[in-house]
Amino acid sequence: MMQQGADNPERATRAKTSSAAELFALIREELAAFEHEFARQIASEVPLIAEIGRYVKDGGGKRIRPALLLLSARLWGRPITPSTIRLAVVVEFIHTATLVHDDIIDGAAMRRGRPSVNARWGNQITVLMGDWLYMRAFEMALEERSFEILDVLTRITRKMTEGELIQLGHIGDLFITRERYFEILQRKTAYLFSACAEIGGILGGASPLEQHALREYGMHLGTAFQLIDDVLDFVADDESLGKPAGNDLREGKLTLPVILLVERGEPKHLEMVRAVLADGDYQRVTRQELVAVLEAEGCLARAREEARAYAQRASACLRVVAPSPYRDALDRIAEFTVERTW
């Protein structure tokens, strides 16, 4: 079922590309099935849930997490089953729930280029919608009757929640350490990437060694992905991001580029960061002025280098898996993660 022409080597080209669609060409039909199942599972007999569910689905997304699960599941030649598609929906539901809750915590007005769920329906309704997404995700996961997969999902969901709580304890913390920053980053982002690759491996028939390699691949990939997100928050525009640029520091969150700047200890640079934190906006210091300093001091370049190192570690983890077009696609995703501009 759903095996398409993806096994054609011509479709497994590793040519450089900026197109996510080309990266996911091997699983085009599977992703179409995912979209159909996502719509089916987010439907509800409760009109308000159904309305918000349609809004969430229509907002789209990168779909990198379900794609990781699907590609990992194909590494050993097994066909994609309806269960695999449902579990791809599960991880996207969990991801969506975290975004919905994050937007409440951050007071975000925009998500993916349009009003956030909380901006349209208010915080009370939105927090319950996020809860519903979590519960629906685990309801679907329970239907698969795999304690191994449930263990992965419950563990990473706990870590993601812990990451959010740890981050809240460091809002406005000018001297947050790199170690704490990476702990938050990995809990909030990388663990879910890791779970997607690991669950795909479980479904695909990975050996214990291969399963561990995929888990590590996902951790390194997710870390690289978030590092680039943190760079793009400064250098990309609102349209590319689908939300206001420069939001992290405005919300009191110091990410690696700013942490590197603070570590230098230059008084005038510390005052710039303090001003943005105190104002909660770019009033006394513009975003352009701060970006110019981050570029001049090499902080953005160093953050990109760090992301590139994690992407290379991710690729190295794939060496224990036999060569295939699907392994090539996962390798290329690691490269693309660092190159992307969205």
Image (cartoon, helix red, strand yellow):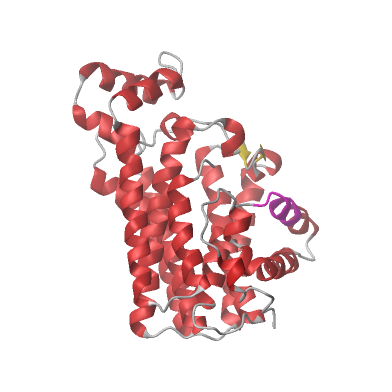
Q: Is residue 337 visible?
A: yes
Quadrant, the C terminus: top right
- The quadrant holding residue 97 is bottom right
Where residue 28 sits in the image (x, y, percent)?
A: 67, 66
Furthest residue toward left: 265
Q: Is residue 146 magenta?
A: no
- The quadrant holding residue 57 is bottom right
Quadrant, the N terminus: bottom right
In the depicted structure, whether residue 96 falls above or below residue 236: below
Furthest residue toward front: 10
On screen, residue 328 versus residue 169, left or right, reads right
Question: Magenta segment, which residues?
Answer: 52-60
**Which of 62/191 is in front?**
62
Residue at image position (80%, 58%) is 47
Where residue 290 sits in the image (x, y, percent)?
A: 38, 22
Where residue 125 sits in the image (x, y, percent)?
A: 66, 49
**Which of 21/85 is in front?**
21
Where residue 52 sits in the image (x, y, percent)?
A: 73, 52
